[in-house]
Image (tube, rainbow, N blue to C red):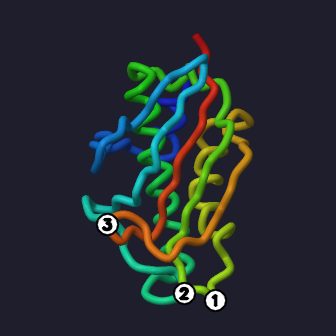
Amino acid sequence: MNIDEKLAELGLTLPEPAAPVASYRPAVIANGMLYVSGQLPLVDGKIVTGKLGDSVTLDQGVAAARACGIMLIAQIKAALDGDLDRVGQIVKLGGFVASTPDFTDQPKVVNGASDLMEQVFGEAGRHARSAVATPVLPLDAAVEVDAVVAIRG
């Protein structure tokens, strides 16, 4: 089963890749690696905003991280000319969680993106990862996730 078929089986439709909000490229290929800029959680066309431990629940944070993961896959697909089967390995995800000082479940939040990568790419979706707290993210986003991907061909 190819990756597009896997997405369909999971009931996932990829959105249009988000345009950069500042002076950077959404993705860069260098030396067989694809570096994808941090993606924000777009749900129904709106960014999930707020802080974990305050206005955003753990479940909402996990869903926001999953939305970041969906946008990462959309960016990967665009960077690879529509061919997600060129993904050799999701090497690393970097997860950033806007949260209050007493919130300590950042790893659980970022699981929303991590679990999605494994569901979509199987063993090639298992990756190294960081999950860190931050007091604020661009546009007041609750979560941001970036990726490093090894590509074939």
Q: Amino acid at mark 1?
A: Asp
**Callout 3 environment at 10 Å: few (<14), some (14 to 19), or many (20+)?**
few
For discs 2 and 1, the disc positioned in front in the rendered view: 1
Question: Residue 54, image x and y in percent?
Answer: 48, 89
**Can residue 1 be seen at all in this image of the molecule?**
no
Q: Mark number for residue 139?
A: 3
Q: Residue at x 60, y 37 (%)?
A: 148
Q: Is residue 22 above or below residue 108?
A: above
Sequence-first tag of 2 and 3: 2
- The residue where tag 2 is placed is 53
For this view, does 75 lie left or right of residue 16? right
For this view, does 145 lie left or right of residue 74? right
- The residue where tag 1 is placed is 102
Please tell me in which quadrant of the rendered image residue 59 appears. bottom right
Q: Are marks 2 and 1 in contact (CB under 8 Å)?
A: yes
Q: Amino acid at mark 2?
A: Gly
Callout 1: SS: loop
**Callout 1 environment at 10 Å: few (<14), some (14 to 19), or many (20+)?**
few
Q: Residue at x 50, y 76 (%)?
A: 135
